[in-house]
Amino acid sequence: MAAGSDKAKPQQGSSSTKNIDLEIMPLSLDNLDAAVVLFIDTFTRAPWNDVYTNILQVRQYLNHYVHASTMDEADSVSTDDLEGGDEGRAAYAHLLPFFGFVARNKRTRQVVALCCGGVKPWLEGMEAYVDEFCVAPELQGQGVGSVFFAAVENILRQSGLNGLILHTNPSYGAYDFYQRCGMSPLEDQSVLAKIITTQA
């Protein structure tokens, strides 16, 4: 996450989930390679079963979220630092156009979760669209995802955002996870997509 000059920098801290102390920090060049490994390790497994033949392509993709960040990695965040939500109102400029966060095991310094997205306007303010969210497969079901999601949500709230949106397959376990995190399905809407190709 980038930090604007008008936003107070969060202080370093830790958040415990079972036996793991998590440290939330911006996606940066220092942790990008670890994030790439996590991303591939997660999404090549069921239920996604994605195939990545070009690791460099994945790195370039996630790198888009790095260059949106200007906050120093030393300014790590914990859920203990993110109580409340009014501080930093309308200070979302540091999140534009994209944001990226990782959760790191404070003891081992291993990157164990990743969240990437973008910010856009809506009629009632500014909202975040979560493009990617994943947790290390061996840590899924242990509360890491819930703690990390809540931490990211609080950072967005403190930055003045008042909406959060994402899409996922309703047949996947992630669908129930996001609802437990407070997300609600938009029953009357569908996700449409189109590949735009360059004309010859």
Image: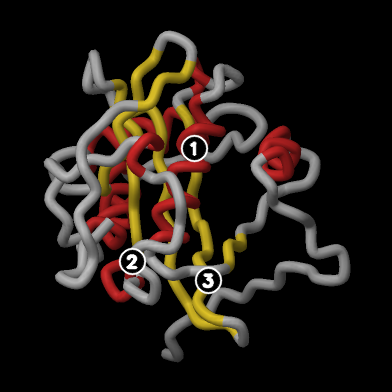
Q: Residue type at mark 1: give it.
A: Cys
Separation of residues labelled 2 and 3 (CA atoms)? 15 Å
Q: Which residue is mark 2?
A: 88
Residue highlighted by disc 3: 127
- Which of the two discs, 2 and 3, labels the residue nearer the N terminus? 2
The quadrant of the rendering that contains the C terminus is bottom left
> Is 181 located above or below residue 168 in the figure?
above
Task: Provide the secondary structure element on which disc 1 rests.
Answer: strand
Say whether marks 2 and 1 touch (CB < 8 Å): no
Quarter of the image holding residue 195?
A: bottom right
Does residue 147 sit above or below 120 in this rendering?
A: above
Question: Along the polypeptide, which appears first: circle 1 or circle 3?
Answer: 3
Q: In which quarter of the view is residue 4 placed?
A: bottom left
Residue 113 versus residue 162 in the image, above or below? above
Residue beneath the point at 34% across and 60% down: 99
**CA–CA distance between discs 2 and 1?**
27 Å
Name the residue tied to disc 1.
Answer: 134
